[in-house]
Amino acid sequence: MEIIQSPAAHDVVVVGSGASGGMAAYNLTQKGVSVLMLDAGDKFDRDKFWTHVLPFEADERLRRGGSPPPFFLDKKEQPYLTPEGKPFNLVRVWGMGGKTNVWGRVSLRMSDLDFGAAERDGWGTAWPIRYADIAPYYDKVEQLIGVCGGDDSSDVLPGSKYYMPAPAPRCGEVFIRKSAESVGIPVVPIRRANLTRDHRGFPACHYCGNCGDGCDTASCFNSADHLIPFALATGNLEIRSNAVVARILTDDRGRASGVQYFDRHSGREREVRARVVVLGASCMDSTRIMLNSRSERHASGLGNSSDQLGRNFCEQIMVHIQGVLPQLFGRRYQNDDGIGGGHYYIPRFNHRTQQDYLRGFGIQMWNTGCDVTGAPVARNTPGFGAGFKAEVKKRYPALVSLHPFGEVLARPENRVTVDESRVDRYGVPLMRVSVEFGDNEQKMRRHMYDTAEEILHTAGAEIFPFDRATNDTPGSAIHEHGTCRMGADPKSSVLNKFNQMHEVDNLFVVDGSAFTNASEKNPTLSILALSWRATDYLAEELRQGNL
Amino acid sequence: MSMERIGPIDRRQALKRVGALAAAPILTGYHPLVSAQEGGAAWQPRFFDAHEAEMVAELSERIIPETDTPGARAANVHQYIDLVVSEDTPENQSAFRRGLARFDSADEARQTDILREGGAFFERLKELTVNGYYKSEVGMKEELGFEGRTFVTVFDGCTHEEHLSWSPSQGEK
């Protein structure tokens, strides 16, 4: 096959345009480094987002042949494999901005409870960094992207002086906060990357609550709007869309020399050369690319002498418990949309007492108050007929929901591999994801349900029936980590403390795969901070001629 | 994230399994089951025959009847149910059809009696009816008064003295 090679070698090729790749391109181009970005899709057109489309209007549009932006990658286009009996829900967005087009925007700082977890309880490998290493970058990221929050700060959740004002709580959240605090569980304002003030040319949030379908005013952080245009404005960024990266190319010394990719639509194979490669294709796709980048020098995948590449997958286990608060029965409709998602957050609290399991969980509370549909309340209201209909209307404003997210331990057997016998449309081996939750997760899940139930009970809620033996399918948190972890020791980790591959000094992996453990926290703020930090180091190494 | 809403279907199914359809902000997505057909008089069911479709309309109206606001029939909930069932598994389709057959030739009082007995068919019919009705224009706007998903300058949140001054001891029974 004819392979088209780019004539010029770029300083840096960045693979991916989401939080990690977008930040890498943003920072490097500001520093004068020439960057080629390869993105597996196109830019999604903000004018065509369905931000304010109601469900029945969406039905009508679909009926007329319309469609919402195609954010989510179809499994038929890019399948992934799972073993029988181990389902995994992998969510991928291929297109400018990646998952930041539709993300939950929860922006929590990790703390030394997280970075020091392995030393404290002996599970897994130690992070090579501490809070003090990343704190200056949290400061910079929050000022850049705009995060709202309160003035709280704790050992679990370090505060910041850069938050925009937090949104006021909804009625149901007022009851939840008082109830949780009365049983000794602190509640804080949510920290979310929604602009509650105008910022950098972007208008403040308009409180429609539907950020998850893409924000038509870019009033919450999205790499495609808040990073990429600023990188382009430097003149140092070139973007190639619909470039599906398959492999990192290496030279005879085993160093990265460029990237092989396929045009998403034509299927044509291409190669680009670069001095340095930055991978930010998301945890699972970056891992697949590295595992597929085999060579004589890298027989089991790129930089994988440690055999840790693809292993130690970790994320969060999620459960949901809902109910209605009689205090709110019969109230008139009130617009509870807000910034989309809960306005309060329950940080991890379990470390203050002894537990029979390791690590911890936090609790989110989206779907509280007058929701976009009364169906959840109706499904949990008994009976039928005129009385039932009246009862649903009475209970509709009273919905409260708690969603605990618990840390899933990194275990070597929970892993991503590639299957040479199963290939995608370009002939590239598919990833196989083998993940199962274990005993620690089961024990934590019990505590998650007990805690949520106790809080709702204290609030006087009528709790909807739930099944303690269930949790969301692995992958559902969309917080994948661990498969290309950092560490001080090349024998037990793939990357060093600057996200640089131990064995390949001109390859940096800046997405969630670099985390050594997941923590209970939503990771995007930390990914942005780590990518900024890694590319500061990268740019300095380039300047000094070390790369 | 968390990127809190993909495989939108998978997440929805997973949530259904835990009994709390709690679509996180990122997982909303849209119901993929939409009719290519026009509504109203020209509507033709995909799955049900005309008699079954009429029974589904009647039964959905038993669950959410017209009161001072329109009921399920006026919201075309039977069309939504037809779409969902048309894409269900053959086993579930047969089960739905068998459930429906019990209501054949039953008068309104008898229909109500059978619904009161409950059971799997009733639960499924009710679930589909409320899912369809409360996302319809009638259900959202006329019945529940929904005015959101729009541009708001200021979000006030809770401003009610009786909530802000509440304490948990009052909530205990």
Image: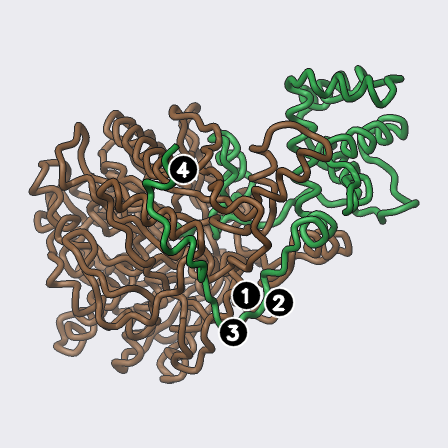
Q: Nearer the viewer, mark 2 or mark 3?
A: 3
The colour assigned to chain A within the rendered structure: brown
The amino acid type found where label 1 is placed reads Phe
Instruction: Name the residue tied to disc 4.
Output: A460
Which image quadrant for residue A473?
top left
Instruction: Name the residue tied to disc 2.
Output: A48
Mark 3 surroundings within 10 Å by alpha-carbon count, few (fewer than 14), some (14 through 19), many (20 or more): few
The amino acid type found where label 3 is placed reads Thr
Residue A417 visible, this angle = no
For residue A169, side relative to residue A357 (left or right): right
Which image quadrant for residue A200?
bottom left
Q: Which of marks 3 and 1 is in front?
A: 3
Distance (Cα) linking label 1 and label 2: 8 Å
Across the whole image, how many numbered discs are drawn on residues?
4
User: Given the current orientation, which residue lies at the most extreme right position?
Assistant: B41
Going from the N terminus, do you reach mark 4 or mark 1 first? Answer: 1
Distance (Cα) linking label 4 and label 3: 33 Å
